[in-house]
Amino acid sequence: MKAMPRLLVLYSAAMSVFLLAPVLVVVVAAFTAGDFIMFPPGGFSLRWFDHVLRDSEFIRPLWNSVRLGVMATVASGLLAIPAALALVRGAIPGRRWIETFLLAPLSLPTIILAVGLLFFTARVGLSSSFTSLLAGHVIITVPYMLRTVLGVYAGMNREIEDAARVLGADGWRTAWYVTLPMIRPGIVAGAIFAFLMSFDEVAVALLLTNADTTTLPVSILSYLVYNYDPAVAAISTIQIAIVVAALLILERFFGIRNVMFASR
Amino acid sequence: MADAARAQGTGENGRANFSALLGLAPILLFLVVFLVGPIWVNLLESLKEPGGAQGLAQYGRIFFDSYYLTVIAQTLIFGFVVTALCILLGYPLGFAVARAQGTAKALLMLVVVTPLMVNVVVRSFGWMVILGGSGALNAGLTALGLPKLELMYNWTGVTIAMVHVLLPFMVLSVASTLEMLDRRIEEAAAVLGAPPARIFWHVTLPLSIEGIVTGGILVFTLAIGSFVTVLLLGKTSTMVLPLLIYQQLTTSSDWPFAAAMGITLLVIVSLTLWAQSWLHPRAMRARR
């Protein structure tokens, strides 16, 4: 095994700086003691975190985002897991086409989905746009769940299921006691992934939320259009912290590498 | 052998098909209602004409107006530039991710994935902090006695931020293709006396074309479909199609026109994906 060329190591270091810079400046700007975002920052203080955590303008959207993310994750699990099991096990005609259709939302620009859902809500006469908002998020998250579960299930030793069947377990018992425990890593990884995708989603939320249901990215965005102060850096830092925590959990249980590559 | 066991008895097979259908029905129903439904409604909306009639008037407004044609052209050029930059910058990094070992690999992976997961609004805000008139970069330049750079509210800033947003997709695509590559082919070339540069150019690169194509198409469709970065870092002259759709909906409330632009964007994305399925077999053939 040869060592990597020095040039490639240098290049990777430079690109790492490029990739991390915008995230790091936000975190640095959040800890300023001054009234403005400036470089170098004017002293160290937690006052902007204090400000943000007392401000319902940010706390309610944060709570909304977490709730919406959890609901979208649970719903996409309920839809994707049975579908993944069916796709791998059943001899379904046109399996390729079904799979392509199920993963189609991945390549659909979210603005198109958002616009369509907005019209749909108006035309069908849904009383609250929250149904459409949740549906839009599930459409975005469900392919991630499906891909990770499909990836894990397809690579699993299926003869264990056959053994359970031979020993007399029916289809449901086999699925519950044998298959589900075996694909659990895929479900956990898919769920974290799905939550992050919902937690980060802007386009659908921008068009379908109101003052009561607004999500964190939307409130940061609308705040940024009119203001530019360390408060937005502080709330962004809280958002980054939640994401990094989720990623570390993912790394610990599953390995980020496996998720990213299995879920291609 | 497992398949043979599963195929035993047609009754068993019929039951398996029934439960497979049961597993697939909810998700299919959900996508038909909430994905196909909205796109269908969008299409109907785009066919509305001012007088209450149905027709292609909204599309006429787009395709016979030099402003909207310019925006479409700008969107496509922006998509191509971002894609090209992501390929150039992302390939070596994807190569490094694929070839790194142990801790270095885990760290690189974390560095690539973390920005991907941080909200696009927050990342664009980060670039505002760096590129702005009194931002971090200009503060550094001033401290060094250098002139300030105009990097925000123009295409330069929007492109830098968008490349940053989409680069991880390219890196991951290239890295996963290179990881599946059989290293013995490279070793064979080395044994036969090829210098490293030649091995890379004639063996490694052609074998990883598929990752570049997959990543490139993904980056392109995402670049022409996102508007948050352009909204925050651009100005009126850096208009792209998705941002125009958003503005038509929120400021001018011209729904049928916004719908027609949405369908136009959808057609462009579909054509791109169709091009991928057309390029894919060619890429596969090139591997052989």
Image (cartoon, rainbow, N blue to C red):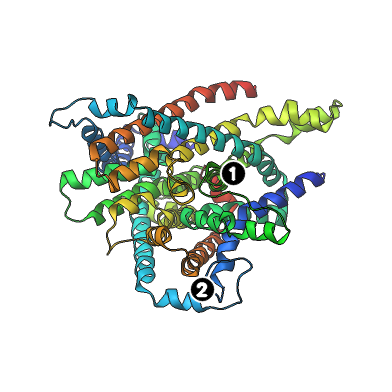
In the rendered image, the quadrant that contains the C terminus of chain B is top right
In the image: residue A119, left or right of residue B8: left
Q: Amino acid at mark 1?
A: Leu
Compare residues B128 and B29 and report the one nearer the observer: B128
Structural crowding at the residue carrying mark 1, measured as other residues with C-alpha within 10 Å and reported as few (<14), some (14–19) or many (≥20) = many
Instruction: Give the CA separation, mark 1 to mark 2.
Output: 39 Å
Q: Is residue A173 visible?
A: no
Q: Is residue A73 above or below residue A237?
A: above
Kind of element beneath mark 1: helix
At x 63% / y 57%, what residue is drawn?
Answer: B138
Compare residues B45 and B236 and report the one nearer the observer: B236
Q: Amino acid at mark 2?
A: Asp
At which x and y percent is residue B90? Answer: 63, 41
Q: Which mark is residue B37?
A: none
At which x and y percent is residue B128? Answer: 53, 56
At which x and y percent is residue A21? Answer: 62, 57
Residue designated by label 1 = B172
Kind of element beneath mark 2: loop
Structural crowding at the residue carrying mark 2, measured as other residues with C-alpha within 10 Å and reported as few (<14), some (14–19) or many (≥20) = few
Q: Tag 1, which chain?
A: B
Q: Is residue B125 above or below residue B151?
A: below
At x 83% / y 30%, what residue is drawn?
Answer: B190
Residue designated by label 2 = A35
User: Based on the displayed image, in which of its 4 quarters is residue B51 positioned?
Assistant: top left
Compare residues B98 and A239 and report the one nearer the observer: A239
Compare residues A84 and A27 and report the one nearer the observer: A27
